[in-house]
Image (spheres, rainbow, N blue to C red):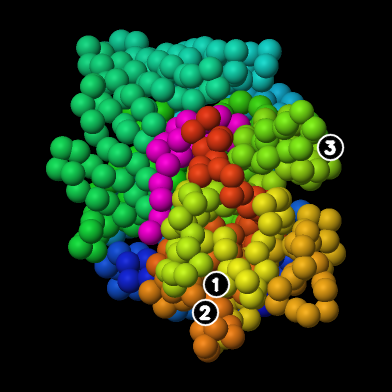
Amino acid sequence: YAYNVRSWTKSITGTLFSQTLNYQEAITGNTPCYNGNISSMSWQSGVETSQRGYRFTYDGLSRLKDALYGEGATLAANTDRFNEQVTGYDKMGNILGLKRYGQTAAGSYGMIDNLTLTYNGNRLQAVKDIATSSVYGNGTEFKDNSNQTVEYAYDKNGNLIKDLNKNISSIGYNCLNLPSQITLAGSTGSNSIDYEYGADGTKLRTVHKTGATTLTTDYCGNAVYENGVLKMLLNEAGYVSFPDRKFHFYLKDHQGNVRVVADKDGNVEETNAYYPFGGTFTSTNSVQPYKYNGKELDTRNGLNWYDYGARHYDATIGRWHVVDPMSEKYYNSSLYMYCANNPIKYIDLTGLAWRLTYDEDHDGKRKYNGYEWVSEEESYNEDGSLKKGLYAQAIFFSDNGTFDSKKNYNIGSSTATVYLADGTTLEYDASTNPSDPEVFATVPEGIYEANVGTHHGSKRNYTALKMRDIRAKSQTLELGMTNPAYQDGRTFATGIDIHYAGYLNYTGTINNGKNGVSQGCLLIDVNAWSNFISNFDNNIQRSNSVSVTVSRTFSTPVNGNRLPAFNFIMNGSRSSFFNSKIR
């Protein structure tokens, strides 16, 4: 990964997937952007021999107008083959017109969608497509299966209950405004999709009925079963397929879109190329359902919706089908608008946050023991900012009591449990003690904050997390005792970072004991460092403060197993996966 001086992602470089993002840089035909909008991007996936890409234009509100396709280093070859263009918005940001281009025959390309959308307020009323060509192959296009004045209907909560273009005759919802049943008309009669959830909104089961055929999919933690047979085990890096027990890796772009699926030997099994609003214009050998933003795409019975957990998303028209759960915070925008109509820059936010939990004794003394999810209603102020004491991401350092100051290898004496903004929790082997506690400061048990910054190591400088007391204006930590590294009686430490351990995870002293790998800093397994820091050093999280808890009382966070392990929160709804320790 590479970044520009503003810490915006500039490029992703890999063997099977590479991507370049341009902002103010000028290439052939693009308009430079200086406000964080992406002016153009290019990528190369799998075994493709040339680059593909888009040049983008925006209106005065940073809403996407034109995504103009091209190939080659300057995107000047094979232009306009897969354009996606918004021809207008209403005053609330609802899309009024959308043009989409794609492959229409072997070797031929042209317009496949020319949509006009009409509304009753913010609610979609009808979509008319006057394009005369249809997509060739497995590309995305809007299916205009109705020609009525009113093709969509909603219930009193603003949930879509009818979509005649998808032959949906009814949608029922539970008390969480999650769909419980979708009924569709089919050539063999009525088809349906039934959903079952946990009390917290976790999707547990879907049942697809197509004529006389029934497919039942169960979601048990990170295990996915089809008709009672284990199909796949999901994890952060990809999935394990069954019954062949093979591992498949996801290669993702700057938004978490699955671009390439590869096996353990690097053989490409699937490649995906996306229109800006999330439809695929090429998807070779689709072997698994997780695509745009890493979300599950349900294509059965012609549904073609992405499941974001709390809502379903239709990439053919760039809209949600139920009201945004955070709509009261964004009253100037449509309740159904996707990512402020800038799907290149933004992804859908979770809307939840992490809050510290603790035990309290009779004297009111707290022992912090983990983190818990806070509902979206409790997480944000009216201006959209996180409330005091809540964090998008957090780290809990627990201690198993195995640290030995006489040993030079103490990685694993602590575990760093990372609570991520998407709800996942990961574990990393760590150490919270200095190389020599008699010479260097020891970070006390307590709560701190950290931000991405530069660690000035003995041999090189690199990106790490820089810690401070919660109310400190500079990078200082109160120790509650004299700092042994100084003779002036100070009771604080400065320059405490979270960085990686030494070569082969060495944690001891160097230069005859005068220096240490840790002079008070918290250390992470050197072999897992790249994975660890990438959770924080990215476009979305780089400027956010991270909550850090150091505990030598707990060997594991209490809340680590209080919620379903490896929690995956999707826009207000929890799905459960297993915890993962990264080594």
The residue drawn where x is 54% and y is 76% is 517
The x and y percentages for residue 11 are 51, 72
Residue at the spot of label 1: 435
Q: Amino acid at mark 2?
A: Thr
Q: Which mark is residue 509?
A: 2
The x and y percentages for residue 527 are 40, 67
The x and y percentages for residue 479 are 75, 62
466 left or right, relative to 258: right
Q: Which mark is residue 75?
A: none
Mark 1–mark 2 distance (CA, rounded to whole Å): 6 Å
Residue at the spot of label 3: 382
Quick check: marks 2 and 3 in contact, CB under 8 Å? no
In the rendered structure, which segment of residues is drawn in magenta? 563-583
**In this view of the protein, which residue sits in the foreground, 165 or 346?**
346
Quick check: marks 1 and 2 in contact, CB under 8 Å? yes
Residue 96 at least partly seen: no
328 left or right, relative to 28: right
Sequence-first tag of 2 and 3: 3
SS of the residue under disc 2: strand
> Mark 3, residues whose alpha carbon is within 10 Å: few (<14), some, or many (≥20)?
few
User: In the rendered image, which quarter is residue 350 located in?
Assistant: top right
